[in-house]
Image (cartoon, helix red, strand yellow):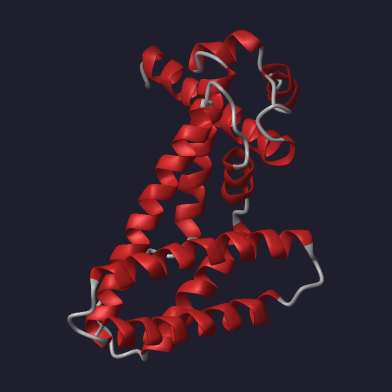
Amino acid sequence: MPRKTDRHHQQGDVSRQRILEAALEIAAERGYDGTSVALVTEKTGLPASSIYWHFKNKDSLLAEVLEFSYRNWREVGPTWKASVTQTPFEEQVHARFRDAAAAFSRKPEFWRLGLMLALEHRVKEPAARGRYIEIRQDTLARLTEWWSGLLEQEHPGTSPDVAITLARFHLAAMDGLFVGANANRGWDLDWLVDTVASGLAVAARRLTQVAS
């Protein structure tokens, strides 16, 4: 028979999960200012005291929500881990963009909430925005590592600056694809993904020629 403390711990984990899921749904739709503890209590059916037991305040809750949404996206998103493969250069670039676009469709909350936070500027920066900026820096580092590995296979000895430039362009393109796909429902996302990927592959080849 499970110990009482174990049951309480499990119940606490379930409550925390419900709070995070509800707050994420609200924040992805309403943004930071439009999210409140009152709305979370209404959606979860849990008392405010339960929310404050798990989270110090709204700011700490939304920082955890941002982290929670990122983990969800990472489960379906591209790995960005470079690997030795015989797959042609352009096909690898296309595959990464297709994986990212698929993840946008399946788990859009992280990118939606994150981009809203990125556009907000306050005297006192919310913890959630700070965490988002940290995650973007980590994503940029992962992209740079991936491009470095890909370029090393295709063009050994390429300057590290090329990988950094391509990673920045790559991340900006992902932002743009997400905004475009959500703002214009009639757009052909598959065509856009392939077109952007083709352009990035061409840019990569030209940059390696300039840097060599």
Q: Closest to the observer: 123 or 21?
A: 123
Furthest-left residue in this view: 157
- Determine the residue positioned at 43% across, 62% down: 168
Furthest-top residue in this view: 49
- Determine the residue positioned at 53% across, 83% down: 199
Question: Height in image: 208 above or below 119?
Answer: below
Question: Height in image: 104 above or below 211?
Answer: above
Q: Closest to the observer: 115 or 102?
A: 115
Residue 121 falls in which quadrant of the image?
top right
Side of 28 where 144 appears, left or right: left
- Determine the residue positioned at 51% across, 11% down: 53
Q: Which x, y percent locates residue 107? A: 59, 54
Q: Which x, y percent locates residue 179? A: 68, 59
Question: Height in image: 52 above or below 193?
Answer: above
Q: Closest to the observer: 88 or 197?
A: 197
Q: Closest to the observer: 53 or 121?
A: 121
User: In what quadrant of the picture does the N terminus appear?
Assistant: top left
Q: Is residue 105 something one can see in this rendering?
A: no
User: In what quadrant of the picture does the C terminus appear?
Assistant: bottom left
Residue 27 falls in which quadrant of the image?
top right
Q: How many marks?
A: 0
Side of 152 where 101 appears, left or right: right
Furthest-front residue in this view: 210
Q: Is residue 83 something one can see in this rendering?
A: yes
- Determine the residue positioned at 39% across, 86% down: 206
Furthest-right residue in this view: 186
Question: Height in image: 100 above or below 87?
Answer: above
Q: Which x, y percent locates residue 30? A: 74, 35
Q: Which x, y percent locates residue 147? A: 33, 72
